[in-house]
Image (tube, grey):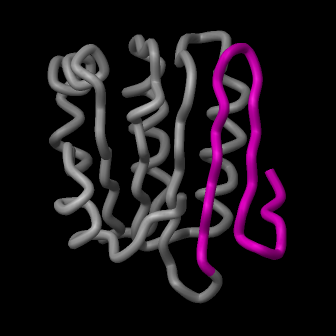
Amino acid sequence: MPMSSDGFHQDSGNGLTVTIHSWPGDGRAHVRLAGEIDIDVSVVLSRTVDWLATSAPVSVLVDLAELTFACATLPNFLVHVRHVLPDGAELILWRPRPLTEWVLQITGMAAIAVIRDTATESLSMHGHLAS
């Protein structure tokens, strides 16, 4: 998943679009997930994890507002993301819809990530967001 020189990359397949914004020298990444997350999107999610492993950001904000469906594949992806981030890196899960939040809660994702509902909370923690 090569990143363009402007810090923007988009990947998609099987009903999921992943958009990544990063800021050179900043150490932060904003990952937007849109569509449906199920086992069929594992390849797209795997490429996202590979990119995060290579870039090693110290802060990752995952925007979940545009997810229309999420199953156990989402927490599996998030665990993989957590494992490839540097020690001490923050993982923020932002704006989950009610069903997505339920999946995050019953799978214990609050143990590996901060879950935030509002832009004010996330902006104060992450500094800025890509539009």
113 versus 36 height, above or below: below
- Looking at the image, which residue sits at the far front? 131
Q: Nearer the viewer, residue 41 or 98?
A: 98
Query: Which residues are the magenta region?
Result: 1-23
In the picture, residue 106 is in which quadrant? Answer: top left
Q: Residue at x 26, y 60 (%)?
A: 122
95 versus 60 height, above or below: above
| 107 with respect to 83 (left or right) | left
Q: Residue at x 44, y 12 (%)?
A: 69
> In x, y percent, where is residue 27?
50, 79
89 versus 94 height, above or below: below
Q: Residue at x 20, y 50 (%)?
A: 118
In the picture, residue 75 is in which quadrant? Answer: top left
| 27 with respect to 105 (left or right) | right
> In x, y percent, where is residue 72?
40, 14
| 63 with respect to 52 (left or right) | left
Q: Residue at x 40, y 56 (%)?
A: 61
Q: Nearer the viewer, residue 65 or 1?
A: 65
> In x, y percent, where is residue 85?
46, 61
Magenta stretch: residue 14 in it? yes
Magenta stretch: residue 121 in it? no
82 versus 88 height, above or below: above
The quarter of the picture where the C terminus appears is: bottom right
> In x, y percent, where is residue 78?
41, 38
